[in-house]
Amino acid sequence: MSTLSAILPSISSDRAHDIGFQMGKWCGKQVFNITYGLSRAIKQPYFWGSIAGACLALMAWIRFKHLLHTVHIEKKGLATRYSNTRLFLLPTMDSGENATQNFSLPYSTFSVRLNFPATVVIMDGKEKLPQLHIDADQSILPLIEHQHVNNTLLLDVKPRSAFETAQGILITVIIPKAQQFNVAVKNGGKAILNGFECPQLECTIEGNSGVLDGDKNTIRERQKIHIKGQGGFQAWSKAKASEVKIEGKGEVSIGVLDDLYVNIEGEGKVSCYTAQPKNYRRDGNGGAVDFDCVDLLKDSRAPVPIPKQPTAPLHEGRAGRIGW
């Protein structure tokens, strides 16, 4: 534990403001006295010394107040709020105590983009608004960010250097009655579709990431799969029409009923556990496409984790950074 975390007790946001005000006031007074003394020593007018002292006092107050408001000590373990100031604490990783944060998302949530190595489970729900649940070590929660931009839920973590050893993050996104949805994963992220019967699905995979469609009994109208660099897509569901594009090295396992278009530029592979559809087109000079791969159905139970039931209150309509 750092020296600062050992000195500061468990404080609330309001208490941090009070302490910051008192420390800033005291520090500003000392700066004012020193400035006034120097102004008299060099025979400068009292007016200019007062102005300089007041400005420095204000700067000191803001600095101390911001520092204490940035540091947040939870009742159980140490958690920090990341700030773009240089005065921040790196958290202690893997404290062994998990916590859950729950948020209500805007109705217009039509896409999820995961930018760090965590697992996001996307599922149907009966709620009026989409929901976001994050379960992770309580020292990691303040580092996880979520933003809602252009109908897209962006999930990321900062600073990334402090996240290298973090494990066991499970993010659950509940989308009620989705008709069309986009999923994008990168930097080692994993997306799992669990009870998500969206008829039109689009997935973008890059940076050694993957998507698992665990809905065995679901038949989608259309799905698009785009792998950039390296990644994988595995589906237990079927689609009437599928479009697969692989740029680099990737593997796709799907079930196709009517239409299939494949474009492989690299060392990609597409395996279908169904027969070749009547409408099949292929572009690109690389990779391979196989049909009737019945071995894919031997293990028809996809390893889908069960999301933890929400235990924390839901923050209605809040979109922004988690923990702020």
Image (tube, grey):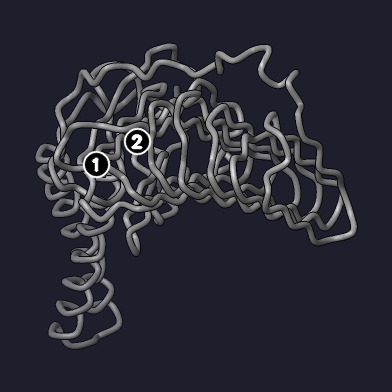
Q: Secondary structure at mark 2?
A: strand
Question: Disc number at residue 149?
Answer: none
42 or 173, which lies in front? 173
Label 1 environment density (alpha carbons within 10 Å; few <14, some 14–19, many ≥20): many
Whole-Å distance between the Cαs marked 1 and 2?
7 Å
Give the labeled residue for mark 2: 173
| Residue 302 shown left or right of residue 38 in the figure | right
Q: Position of residue 226 (x, y in %)?
A: 64, 53
Where residue 209 sits, quadrant-wise, is: top right
Q: Which residue is mark 1?
A: 130
The answer to whether the residue labelled 1 contacts the one labelled 2, judged by CB atoms less than 8 Å apart, is yes
In the picture as drawn, the residue positioned furthest to the front comes out as: 278
> In the image, what residue type sits under mark 1?
Pro
Three-letter code for the amino acid on which mark 2 is drawn: Val
**Viewer-closest of 219 and 186:** 219
Q: Position of residue 294 (x, y in %)?
A: 73, 21
Residue beneath the point at 50% across and 50% down = 222
Q: Is residue 289 left or right of residue 235?
A: right
